[in-house]
Image: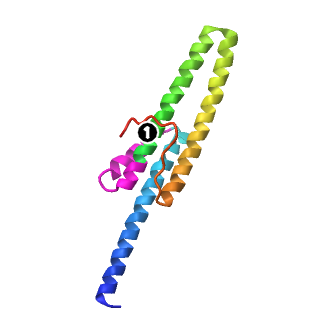
Amino acid sequence: MTHTEATMTSTTMTSTLANSEDRNWAVLAHLSSLVNLLGIPSPLGPLVVWLIKKNESPFAAQAAKSSLNFALSVWIYSVAFLVLAILGFVGSIQTGFTLSLLCLFAWIGLILCSMIFSIIGAVKASSGESYNYPFVIELLK
């Protein structure tokens, strides 16, 4: 192998490793919002990844920002369901119970969808694609 071929091979391997590392960080950013299953606030994981990678990897930083926006949106929707459930329950016993039950089911659906969307984001990131979460309030641009 000539010196030029060795240099080209080395450069190709380095860029492949960097792309692979970026994808791994992006996968971590999407999956890190699942730490809420352990009782840790879900925005914490994507926030840490974003703070670490925001100046190093545009792909990983964008994935982390997207995941962070989604985690914050899920929090906002959860608080809205809680407020509606409490207001409905205080307003009337029969109507309140129905509204509270609907809010509970909606919240469970929201949590299940957030887990599914995080996994979809991780799968997309592992193949080098960016993922836009549905129903996101873009707090970080």
**Is residue 45 visible to the viewer in this orientation of the structure?**
no
Residue 131 versus residue 8 in the image, above or below: above
Residue 43 in the image, given as x and y percentages of width and height: 44, 39
Residue 18 versus residue 51 in the image, above or below: below
Residue 99 in the image, given as x and y percentages of width and height: 64, 18
**Is residue 51 visible to the viewer in this orientation of the structure?**
yes
Q: Quadrant of the N terminus?
A: bottom left
Q: Which residues are drawn in magenta?
A: 40-63
Q: Residue at x 50, y 59 (%)?
A: 126
Residue 82 magenta-highlighted: no
Q: How is the image coloured?
A: rainbow
Residue with the mark numbered 1: 69
Location of residue 13 by image quarter: bottom left
Q: Seen from this angle, which residue lies furthest top?
A: 92
Amino acid under disc 1: Asn
Q: Residue at x 49, y 32 (%)?
A: 75
Residue 4 in the image, given as x and y percentages of width and height: 30, 85
Location of residue 44 by image quarter: top left
Residue 58 magenta-highlighted: yes
Q: Residue at x 57, y 14 (%)?
A: 87
Closer to the camera in the image, 45 or 107: 107
In the rendered structure, the answer to whether residue 141 lies left or right of residue 81 reads: left
Residue 132 versus residue 79 in the image, above or below: below
Closer to the camera in the image, 75 or 45: 75
Residue 90 in the image, given as x and y percentages of width and height: 60, 10
In the rendered structure, the answer to whether residue 19 lies left or right of residue 102 reads: left
